[in-house]
C-alpha cells in the first residue's frame, strides 16, 4: 500500500513541481489558487489541478493551499 501512495505522489507533484501550478508553467496564479480552494471545498474535482495535491492524498488541505498561495506571492522554487 505504501508503494501505491508514493506512486500517486509522484504523479501529482513531480520533483521540482510547484504546489498549485495547475498549468505546469512554473508559476502559480490567482485563478489556480481559487481552483485549489474550490477543490478543498468539494466544489471541483481534484482532476482540475493535481498539482494542488502535493502529498497525493486525493484532497487539497489548508497547508497545500498556503503553499500554493506562497508560490503565487513569492514564486515557485527552482526545479
Image (cartoon, grey):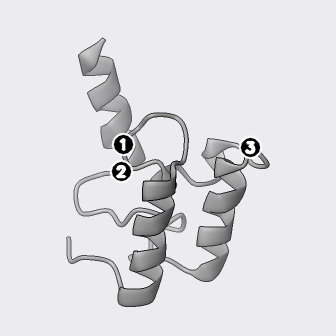
Q: Position of residue 73 (x, y in %)?
A: 44, 87
Choose mark 3 or mark 2, whichever is in front: 3
In this rendering, position of residue 13 left or right of residue 32: left
Above or below residue 34? Residue 45 is above
Q: Residues within 10 Å of mark 3 (few under 14, many from 20)?
A: few
Tell me which residue sits at (39%, 50%) in the image. Answer: 54
Q: Position of residue 78 (x, y in %)?
A: 21, 77
Of the numbered discs 3 and 2, the one sitting upstream in the chain is 2
Q: Which residue is mark 3?
A: 42
Give yes or no for contact between labels 3 and 2 (Cβ–Cβ under 8 Å): no
Q: Residues within 10 Å of mark 1 (few under 14, many from 20)?
A: some
Give yes or no for contact between labels 1 and 3 (Cβ–Cβ under 8 Å): no
Q: Which residue is mark 2?
A: 13
Choose mark 1 or mark 2, whichever is in front: 1
Q: Which type of secondary structure does the marked residue at label 2 adopt?
A: loop
Tell me which residue sits at (33%, 78%) in the image. Answer: 76
List the single residue furthest toward the front: 62
Of the numbered discs 1 and 2, the one sitting upstream in the chain is 2
Above or below residue 27? Residue 33 is above
Above or below residue 68? Residue 71 is below
**Quarter assignment of residue 63:** bottom left
Residue 27, visible in the rendered structure: no
Tell me which residue sits at (32%, 62%) in the image. Answer: 17
The alpha-carbon separation of the residues under discs 1 and 2 comes to 8 Å
Point out the image quarter for the N terminus.
Answer: top left
**Quarter assignment of residue 10:** top left
Q: Which residue is mark 1?
A: 55
Tell me which residue sits at (53%, 63%) in the image. Answer: 22
Of residue 14 and residue 59, the one placed in the foreground of this image is 59
In this rendering, position of residue 78 left or right of residue 76: left
Amino acid at each position: 500500500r505504501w508503494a501505491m501512495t508514493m506512486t500517486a505522489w509522484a504523479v501529482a507533484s513531480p520533483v521540482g513541481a510547484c504546489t498549485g501550478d495547475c498549468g505546469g508553467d512554473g508559476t502559480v496564479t490567482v485563478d489556480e489558487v481559487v481552483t485549489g480552494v474550490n477543490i478543498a471545498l468539494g466544489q471541483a474535482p481534484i482532476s482540475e489541478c493535481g498539482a494542488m495535491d502535493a502529498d497525493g492524498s486525493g484532497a487539497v488541505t489548508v497547508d497545500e493551499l498556503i503553499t500554493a498561495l506562497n508560490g503565487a506571492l513569492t514564486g515557485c522554487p527552482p526545479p
